[in-house]
Image (tube, rainbow, N blue to C red):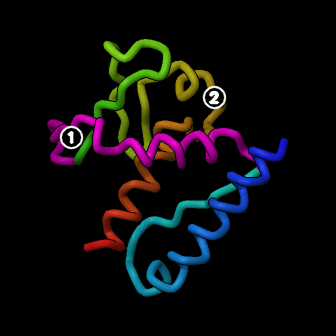
Amino acid sequence: MSMLVSISTQVSILVLALLSKLCYHEAMIVSLDTNNPRSLRGVALAAKAASWLHIRLADGRTGYGMPSSDDPLHYWLVTPDSCTCPDAKYGNGRACKHSFAVRLFEVLSAVSN
C-alpha cells in the first residue's frame, strides 16, 4: 500500500508541475486517477516511450508499437483512442494502460516542444 501511496504522490506532483504549461497548450487532457490501476501502469509505460515503435498509419495518424509486458517479442498497436490488447477489447469502453500511456506521452511531448 505504501508503494501505491508513493506512486500516487509522485503522479500528483507530476500533474501539478505540468498544469501551468498544459493550461496554455492546446492538447488533449489526460486525467490521472490514482484509484485506477490503469492510470498508474500507464504512467510507468509512458516512462518507457523510447522503446516504442513509431508508426504512420494509413490514415496519416501516428500509432505506436508497444512491447507486451508478458511477451517482449509481441507488440500491441496503440493510438490514443485504440489498442489491440485484450484489456482494450474487453474493457467495457475504458482506456487500457497502453492507450493511457500514449495519451500521456503525446501531452508531455507537446508540452516539451
Name the image quarter holding residue 105: bottom left
Give the quarter of the figure containing the C terminus. Answer: bottom left
User: Disc 1 on helix, strand or loop?
Assistant: strand
Residue at x-position 63% and y-position 60%: 11
Give the image location of residue 69, x and y in percent. Answer: 48, 22
Q: Are marks 1 and 2 in contact (CB under 8 Å)?
A: no
The tag on residue 54 is 1
Q: Nearer the viewer, residue 51 or 82?
A: 51
Residue at x-position 21% and y-position 40%: 54
Give the image location of residue 76, x and y in percent. Answer: 37, 25
Give the image location of residue 86, x and y in percent. Answer: 53, 19
Tell me which segment is drawn in magenta.
35-61
The tag on residue 110 is none
Horizontally, is 93 left or right of 23 in the view?
right
The tag on residue 91 is 2
Q: Is residue 12 magenta?
A: no
